[in-house]
Amino acid sequence: MSHLRLLLVSLGLALSGCSGLLHSSAPQLQLYMVQAPQAVTVNADGAAGSSSAPRTIGPTLRIARPLPAPGLNTDRIALTRPGNRLDYYAGGRWSAPLSDVVSDLQLAAFRADPVWSAVADDRGTLNADYLLQTSVDRFSAEYATQTAPPTIRVDLHCLLIRRSDGVLVGSFAVRQSQQAQANRMASVVAVFSQVADQAVLAVAAQADQLLRSAKSPAVP
């Protein structure tokens, strides 16, 4: 048997053995969704109100595709370990890249807000009055120790821009956090949904406040 044939046979046996090992030990890939906020309105302080308020003719909003920080621009579920080490959960993924996840959450929150007569994201063609730009600075589970349940942190930084002249109406930051009840994937994802919902509802409330302030008559 030639040396080449021996090499190919050896590689085949090695790969055959490894494939069985990988099949038995690799975690099964699971896709997780972040549940959108309930269809409620938001007040200036971020508190939920009634969703039955009638729509009025008002400004329109376009939500730009959010910009995740380095390491977050992925569908992998990020975590940080002691020493500020970035890592990801094995076998778990968001149902879409993080920019799409956050965009969909914002879309749901603002569409439930009667301050805006129409809201669209970058997938639409709405020529809106205002543009919301968002940076996702944190969207991760942070571990203080190797075994304790992590604290879920979502930090967003937003700009509200008037599109007619490009004027910055204002900027603001939203930071939300909550500790998971257990160091299990189901618990971690559930708290991600809660914290992310709180964050996007706070974003809607802050944007509404900026809009009201911009439209208020100047005090002499």
Image (tube, helix red, strand yellow):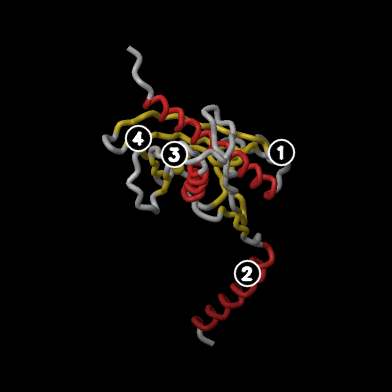
Q: Which residue is mark 2?
A: 18
**Mark 2 or 4, nearer chain start:** 2
Q: Which label lies toward us, 3 or 2?
A: 3
Q: Is residue 123 left or right of residue 165?
A: right
Residue 210, given in percent of the width and then of the height, sits at 42, 28
* Quadrant that contains the N terminus: bottom right
Whether label 2 touches label 4, CB < 8 Å:
no
**Mark 1 or 2, nearer chain start:** 2
Q: Which label lies toward us, 2 or 4?
A: 4
Foreground residue, 1 or 139?
Answer: 139
**Mark 3 or 2, nearer chain start:** 2
Q: Which residue is mark 3?
A: 56
**Mark 4 or 1, nearer chain start:** 1
Q: Which mark is residue 148?
A: 1
Q: Residues within 10 Å of mark 4 (few under 14, many from 20)?
A: many
Foreground residue, 91 or 200?
Answer: 200
Q: Quadrant of residue 146 in the image?
A: top right
**C-alpha span from label 3 to label 1:** 48 Å
* Quadrant that contains the C terminus: top left
| Vertical position of residue 100 compared to residue 204: above or below | below
Q: Which mark is residue 161?
A: 4
Residue 40, given in percent of the width and then of the height, sits at 57, 40
**C-alpha span from label 3 to label 2:** 63 Å
Q: Residue furthest left?
A: 165
Q: Which label lies toward us, 1 or 2?
A: 1
- Can residue 32 be seen by looking at this rendering? yes
**C-alpha span from label 4 to label 3:** 21 Å
Residue type of the residue flagged with mark 2: Cys
Residue at left offset 45%, top offset 41%: 69
Instruction: For mark 1, give the secondary structure.
Output: loop
- Can residue 88 be seen by looking at this rendering? no
Q: Quadrant of residue 63 in the image?
A: top left
